[in-house]
Amino acid sequence: MTKLETSIRKIVVFGPQGSGKGTQAEFLSKELNIPWISTGNIYRQNIKAQTELGKLANQYIIEGKLVPDQVTNRLVAERLKEKDAQAGFILEGYPRNRGQAETLDQMTQISAVLEIAISDEEAIRRISGRRVCTCGMTFHIDFNPPKQEGICDQCGKKLFQREDDQEETIRQRLAIYHQNTEPLLKEYLKRGILIRVNGEQGISEVKKEIFQKMDENNFSKK
Ligand SMILES: [Zn+2]
């Protein structure tokens, strides 16, 4: 076992939309054999199991509103108490603001915070280039283009861009990230637990940099 596998357990992954943080969180979870916990997963599990909090969260999600912090905080607290999370976890999509970060500090002690950094322009390029088909196929105009422009390889239908993937929507989300989420990183930097990686590389290069930097930094004392 490497130092990383034995010492670092409670990891939070930060990054704007398009940074690939979900993909990296999943890699880490598999490599370290600890659960990948995202607010998206927690909502889905609780909605499926029809828990009281799940029903409550679902009302907001159906209306396209943000789930209030009190509900999200309670859902995360419940999830972190589960048996599989006792040896550690990869938390993604939480905390998103100062209130949530303070609540998380009351729940547990975080051992490392990963920031997957990409510029706004790169985030926009990655997301706004997505094209989807009603059959379920997805393409990207730069990274995975269809054989014929604007046409689905699989079924021949016309591809379209999801509203969520439009530049205007992405810019709004990025602004919220810069305003509410990014300032939290300064606090983690002060605590000496922040690891910043360049997210503008390929998926496997980002993964490599994460593992290198986590191994270089000795977090075992924290
Ligand atoms: Zn299709």
Image (cartoon, rainbow, N blue to C red):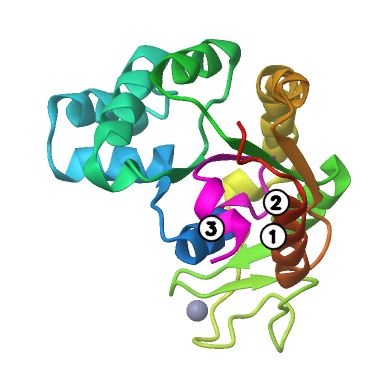
Does residue 66 appear anywhere in the picture? yes
Name the quarter where the C terminus is drawn.
top right
Question: What residue is rendered at 81% in x and 46% in y?
Answer: 118
- Going by the numbered disc 3, the residue's amino acid type is Glu
**In the image, residue 93 lies at what x, y percent?**
52, 37
The answer to whether 51 appears left or right of 80 in the picture is: left
Q: Is residue 108 left or right of residue 184?
A: left
Residue 50 quadrant: top left
Q: What residue would you read off at disc 3?
A: 5
Per the image, the residue denoted by label 2 is: 214
Look at the picture and state if 110 lies above or below 209. above
Instruction: Give whichever of 166, 95 is nearer the camera.
Output: 95
**Front residue of 197 and 182:** 197
C-beta proximity under 8 Å, tags 2 and 1: yes
Of residue 191 and residue 154, the one placed in the foreground of this image is: 191
Q: Amino acid at mark 2?
A: Met
State the residue position of label 1: 211
Crowd class of label 2 (few under 14; some 14 to 19; many from 20; radius 10 Å): many
Residue occupying image coordinates x 36% and y 13%? 70
Circle 1 Cα neighbour tier, 10 Å, few/some/many (<14 / 14–19 / ≥20): few
**Disc 2 from disc 1: Cα separation:** 5 Å
Q: Residue at x 22, y 23 (%)?
A: 56
What amino acid type should be assigned to the residue bearing mark 1?
Phe
Magenta region, residue range: 1-22
Q: Nearer the viewer, residue 49 or 13?
A: 13
Task: Count residues near mark 3 (Cα–Cα under 10 Å), then give few for <14, some for 14-19, many for 20+.
Answer: few
**Spot occupied by residue 170 in the image (x, y as percentages of width and height):** 70, 39
Q: Is residue 124 left or right of residue 181?
A: right
Q: Are marks 3 and 2 in contact (CB under 8 Å)?
A: no
- Which element type, helix, strand or loop, lies under badge 3? helix
